[in-house]
Amino acid sequence: MANRLPLFGIIGAVIVFLVYSSLFVVNEREQAIVLRFGEVVEVKSEPGLYFKLPFAFMEADNVQIIEDRLLRFDIDDIRVQVSGGKFYEVDAFVAFRISDPRRFRATVSGSILLAEQRLRTRLNAALRSVYGLRGFEAALSKERADMMREVRDQLRPDAASLGLEIGDVRIRRTDLTAEVSQQTYDRMKAERLAEAERLRARGREAAQRIKARADRQVVEIIAEARKESEIMRGEGEAERNSLFASAFSRDPEFFEFYRSMIAYATALENTGTTMVLSPDSEFFRFFQDSEGAKPADAPAPAQ
């Protein structure tokens, strides 16, 4: 009996090894592809404990674990040409999951890396196609969502041929290339300078209009003021003449005396003018007589 213990131990170890190599576990984030001599036998998509034939090293049954969750891969610095002929750089990402494990195994041998490489090529082509039909502004407007849907729809048939399902495609960045950035900057600078010149021209035109209107108003105001001043001067002259006439009618002798005094003050003021008059002239009659009597006529010469 004691000699059989090693044998029982060996048999037990073999049984444990066979049981262990026949079991595999699938969790909630995975799928399992069961391969028998390289051919897909079945796919386990539900989480749990499963059995297979042992001796995987003899290629009896192999299990390949693949993802059963939403995956993502990014693609950066794609150079695309828009409808205007300019080039831009685009960053995007794709969210996908493995929907057909059998096809996925047959096309890319169950390799996520190979699947992403093939999707990258197709995504690059889809982005170029969608951007080529639009201008750069479309990627910055509400049309961006339509562009992403178009890229996704173009990518889905190719992804389905790989056993993949495209959940979403998102454009993360759309930017100018270095040379286009400089060209765009120069163009925007020229546009701003032109706009500034237009504004200055409008300002000068408005200033000229305001100045012309102000000059016209100045002329009109001065003319109106002169008109009113002339009217008032005329009214003053009329009032003055009326007063003079009234004063003359009341005391003609005093009025004549007053007028003579005014004439003296005006004529004899320091004006630098030389006057040669006879002392007995009419102009000086109030110097000789306060009554202003006229001098007697000179006697006639003897015959």
Image (tube, helix red, strand yellow):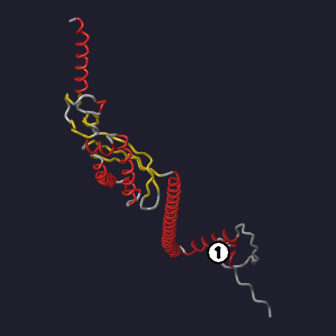
In this rendering, the answer to whether 4 lies above or below 290 is above
Q: What amino acid type is highlighted by mark number 1?
A: Gly
In this rendering, the answer to whether 225 lies above or below 119 is below
Q: Quadrant of the N terminus?
A: top left
Residue 151, position as x, y percentages in the image: 33, 53
Residue 79, position as x, y percentages in the image: 45, 52
Q: Residue furthest right?
A: 303
Is 275 or 232 nearer to us in this picture?
Answer: 232
Q: Is residue 103 left or right of residue 303?
A: left
Which residue is under mark 1? 292
Determine the residue positioned at 21% across, 36% down.
45
Q: Is residue 171 left or right of residue 225?
A: left
SS state under label 1? loop
Q: Residue furthest bottom?
A: 303
Residue 103, position as x, y percentages in the image: 27, 45
Is 296 or 67 nearer to us in this picture?
Answer: 67
Determine the residue positioned at 64% across, 75% down.
292
Is 81 or 6 nearer to us in this picture?
Answer: 6
Q: Can you see residue 186?
A: yes
